[in-house]
Image: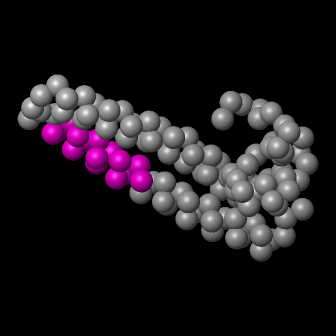
Amino acid sequence: MLKSQDVRRFQERLKTERDAIESRIATNKHGIQETVQDDSGVGDSGDESNLLYEREAEIDENARDQKELAQVKRALDRIEQGTYGLSEVSGKPIPIERLEAVPYATTLVDERPLEAE
């Protein structure tokens, strides 16, 4: 079972991670908007394909960030509810080593998540 100081440490780490992801998402949105605005003065088809590739990469990165942000927020909610560090599948404690590696883990390594993450 996790000690209260461990839970506080993970909570701080998750909050820092949440803020970093939210900042990346905001920066990325700004970058995508700039790329869209730049399209109006596109030169040749090579430039255009580079811009499209750049925009798709930014959108993919944004989708990954959104997914990770949801997992981090869910972990913070679990801390508030007192269920952080317990598997959502079996209710067993998640080893601290797993939480060190993946602080928003909701299952043991060999368990399948209840919902597709």
Q: Quadrant of residue 32?
A: top left
Of 35 and 22, nearer the camera is: 35
Query: Is residue 30 located in the magenta-colored stretch of the structure?
Result: yes
Look at the image and tell me whether residue 103 can be seen.
Answer: yes
- Measured along the vertical axis of the image, is residue 57 above or below residue 14? above
Of 96 and 5, nearer the camera is: 96
Residue 59: where, in percent of width, then height? 39, 36
Look at the image and tell me whether residue 77 can be seen.
Answer: no
Residue 80: where, in percent of width, then height? 70, 58
- Measured along the vertical axis of the image, is residue 49 above or below residue 101? above
Left or right of residue 115, residue 93 in this image: right
Left or right of residue 101, residue 65 in this image: left
Quadrant including the C terminus: top right
Residue at x 17% of width, y 25% of height = 45
Residue 88: where, in percent of width, then height? 81, 42
Residue at x 88% of width, y 53% of height = 93
Query: What residue span does the magenta drawing correspond to?
Result: 24-38
Residue at far bottom of view:
5
Residue at x 71% of width, y 70% of height = 8
Quadrant including the N terminus: bottom right
Left or right of residue 29, residue 81 in this image: right
Of 23 and 31, nearer the camera is: 31
- Measured along the vertical axis of the image, is residue 106 above or below residue 55? below
Q: Quadrant of residue 10?
A: bottom right
Residue 69: where, in percent of width, then height? 55, 48
Main secondary-structure element of the magenta-colored stretch: helix
Query: Is residue 117 located in the magenta-colored stretch of the structure?
Result: no
